[in-house]
Image (cartoon, helix red, strand yellow):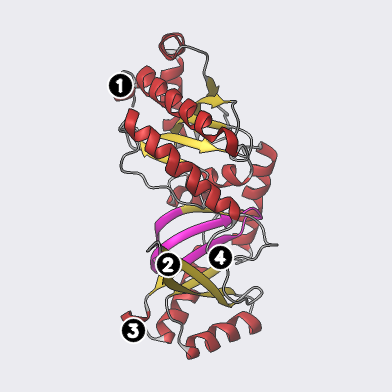
Amino acid sequence: MIEEEEPDVTLVKRQVAIEGVGIADLLLIDSNGLPMVVETKLAKNGESRRQVVGQVFDYVSALTLLTVDELDQKVSGSLETAMMILSNDEETSIEKCWQACGANLRAGKARVVVAIDEAPEDLVRILRFLNEHSDLDVRLVEIKQYVDQESKEVFFVPRLLVGGEVTGFRPPSSGQQLKLLDFFKQLLEKSNKKISLFKKVSPAGYQSWLLAGAGKAGLAWQYAVRRTDAKVELFFQASEASLNTKRFNALFDKKEQIEKQFGEPLEWDYKENRKQQYIRSLSLLGGLSNEDKWKEIQDDLVSRMVKLEKALRVYIPTLP
């Protein structure tokens, strides 16, 4: 779907309703602000090549009618969150990515990825023609399932057939993605023994965070890890910036009591020109690159999440 030399990509949201077209399976964004729609297909479902090709045109034409603000609103603020992940929370990089995404949408630039378990030759031919003889950025990925006969572990291996630099079979994930998956699997195992917030959450190797509902729409508990540090947060992610501000301010008014219960100062991360806001506690023991310290980092994160939830639980039900 992406090549090694291309910009980093992260998930924006699954199951995105695109007006007049349908539900896109995945919406992604890269660090250059290029939006990407991923549509998964099963060969046995028998959709005709014309239906698939028509859907490609539909997705690009409908998606690029939106402004970047409209797209962010459609995904309940997840677009800005994804940009923050790609930019490591650096405001200048987030702003550049935001502006680039807006420019791409205005220019009609978006990528559509069709992922299928078995690609018919005629579909490969048509999508390759579109990709080579038009301005559309279309990729076709064939994904095969393999089972290790000894461990019985299941692997899904992608093969890029159309778009970018066509390759043979490649490992399903980069080393970074596998590390993220391992880190969060281990973290969840520890977390679920201490607190029930994340028991219905599964890690994904392409995400550097885990979200769980905090009891009100637009509020979430979050574990996040970066290269050299990690953090726990209450994430204000409502689609209305004014609601996030009201909720943040209501808790900020109780700052002294909350921090006394937590046991140390918290980072109250509010920015007026940003839709989403955060209350956070940072772990400085290390991050994803410090594999020898993962156990200590994970234990510290779980401890901080337990304390954060305990310090805030009495106030969350009273928020607007």
Q: CA distance from mark 3 to mark 1?
A: 51 Å
Residue 5, x across and y down, in percent? 70, 62
SS assignment at label 2: loop
Q: Nearer the viewer, residue 101 or 118?
A: 118
Image: 305 above or below 220:
above
Residue 264, x across and y down, in percent? 50, 12
Which residue was labeled with disc 2?
148
The amino acid marked with disc number 2 is: Asp
Q: Which label sits on residue 247?
A: none
Q: Nearer the viewer, mark 4 or mark 1?
A: 4
Q: Which label sits on residue 171?
A: 4
Image: 140 above or below 36:
below
Which residue was labeled with disc 1?
318
Q: Nearer the viewer, mark 4 or mark 3?
A: 4
The amino acid marked with disc number 1 is: Thr
Q: CA distance from mark 4 to mark 2?
A: 14 Å
Q: CA distance from mark 1 to mark 2?
A: 51 Å
| Residue 86 visible somewhere in the drawing | yes
Which residue was labeled with disc 3?
46
Answer yes or no: do the residues labelled 3 and 2 have beta carbons within 8 Å?
no
Earlier-in-chain disc, 4 versus 3: 3
Give, as a single range, the part of the protein colored magenta: 13-38
SS assignment at label 3: loop
| Residue 275 visible somewhere in the drawing | no
